[in-house]
Image (cartoon, coloured by chain):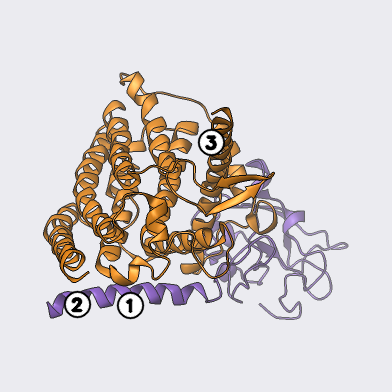
Amino acid sequence: MKDTIHKVLSMINGLFIVLKYAFKQPITVRYPEVKRQTSSRFRGLHYLTKWDDGLERCVGCELCAIICPAQAIYVKPAQNDPDHPHSHGERYASDFQINMIRCIYCGYCEEACPTGAIVLSNEYELSTYTREEMIWTKDMLTEKYPGESGRDPKREI
Amino acid sequence: MKEIVIEVVVKGIVVISLLMLAAAYMTFMERVVMARMQLRLGPNRVGPFGLFQPIADGIKLLTKESFQPDSIDVVTYWLAPAIALFTAFFAFALIPFGGTVTVFGQQVSLQIANVNAGVIFFLAFSSLAVYAVVLAGWSSNDRYSLLGGLRATAQMISYEIPMGLSLLTVVLSAGTLNFNEIVDAQRGHWFVWTHPISFIVYVITMFAETNRAPFDLPEAEQELTGGYNTEYGGLKFAIFFLGEYVNMLAVSSIAVTLFLGGYLGPWDIPVLWFVVKVFILIFFFMWVRATMPRFRYGQLLDFSWKVLLPVSIVNLVVTSWFVLVVK
């Protein structure tokens, strides 16, 4: 009998615990209007960063394409023209594509890059209407101005 | 004669359309209330505060493809939703929503039919409600539906008995089966104060009769993929859904009429107090659904036959002793 009363009372207690939660602030984020603050180490869309002087950091070494576990990166290296160099090295990437459907956002490319050219940003809204649009090409990936990705353009790596 | 017929028809149409609207907005209210209790927001996209959500849902269900599974019993398959809605609506023919009001210079009582044996009528039609579920489960030729229908039969028949016994105590002390007179008998005090055990038993059976959580075994989404209405889609499903919500309103209205003083309240405002009391009970339905987990099937029947039935029989005997000897 005592046990039964205890059970019934705990049931009623449960009702009031639930009612208490009705007066708390909902934790839902109203997504398209309000965006959740991502952590600073969040891995999203890639950027090809530039040096302070506007030259590309990428030297076309293809280490990112080699390390990529999903084989999502394609790099086409080319010799730099000494008069109009694209990068500080001998070579530069004449084409650079990342397939964002294949990419698993592991960040290995960022770790492998010897010049710190490829970095992962906090951008995560990547949906498109066709699969072809999901392949980001070099001009989409490259920073519009040095420091656009949020990384210091003066850094060594 | 002609005037009476017109009056009843008008009242019926008004009540049915209001009930349809109320049931539609109860789905919205349930979603919002449960969302708030689970720290969510609930529907808030369609219209201001999501208020047009039921309309959008209705349009969606209306424009869905009308399908019917292979090798079913066609007549009962189509009849079952109609029975569900009809039995749910029927209870509202008996319930007094208020006293008498004057409309266009005519005295109109806010009750569709003032039946002398109202309580008996209500019990009869609430036991008919089981047919909708059973026939739906049996006719759609699907194991989940059949299991749901079987569960519903056992559950609704078991819980009908304590429900009837708990209503009998009220009938005994009011000395009448007429809903209007039962409400009048509560002018001094509500029956919930003199019959608390009957009220508790009735509230529990109320949940079981409407197949609501924690007694929602016949339509358990997790185990039975929807139970008896698995094979129903589009408007047929909508009718079942409406039936369930109107049924909730019906049993709440009966509880209000028999235990909570019906339309009586401070100041003489016709329908207000009735609606407020029903609203509180409906909120209780949703609150319990957000809290309680589902019964096991054995526990469900044990609870009815081993707990509720003895309690309500003892309650009935004690009440009759009070009515016969003490009064």
Q: For the N terminus of chain B, give its image quadrant.
A: top right
Between residues B207 and B38, which one lies in front from this camera angle?
B207
Q: Nearer the viewer, mark 3 or mark 2?
A: 3
Q: How far is disc 3 from disc 2 in space, using C-alphas?
A: 49 Å
Q: Which mark is residue A13?
A: 1
Position of B225 with respect to B29 (left or right) is left
Given the current orientation, which residue lies at the most extreme right position? Answer: A83
Residue carrying label 3: B8
Q: State whether discs 1 and 2 lie on one chain.
A: yes
Q: Considering only vertical position in the picture, is B283 above or below A37?
A: above
Would residue A68 be visible to someone looking at this image?
Answer: no
Element carrying mark 2: helix
Question: What residue do we see at 40% from left, 23% from top?
Answer: B68
According to the picture, the residue beneath numbered tag 2 turns out to be A5
In this rendering, position of residue B68 left or right of residue B305? right
Q: Which colour denotes chain B?
A: orange
Q: Position of residue B78 (x, y in %)?
A: 39, 25
Tell me which corner region of the image, top left, top right, bottom left or bottom right, holds residue B306: bottom left
Amino acid marked by disc 1:
Asn
Quick one: SS at disc 3? helix
> Does residue B236 lie above or below B224 as drawn?
above
Q: Quadrant of the C terminus of chain B?
A: bottom left
Q: What residue type is labelled 2?
A: Ile
Colour in which chain A is drawn: purple
Identify the amino acid type marked 3. Val
Q: Nearer the viewer, mark 1 or mark 2?
A: 2
Element class at badge 1: helix
Q: In this view, does B297 lie above or below B288?
A: above
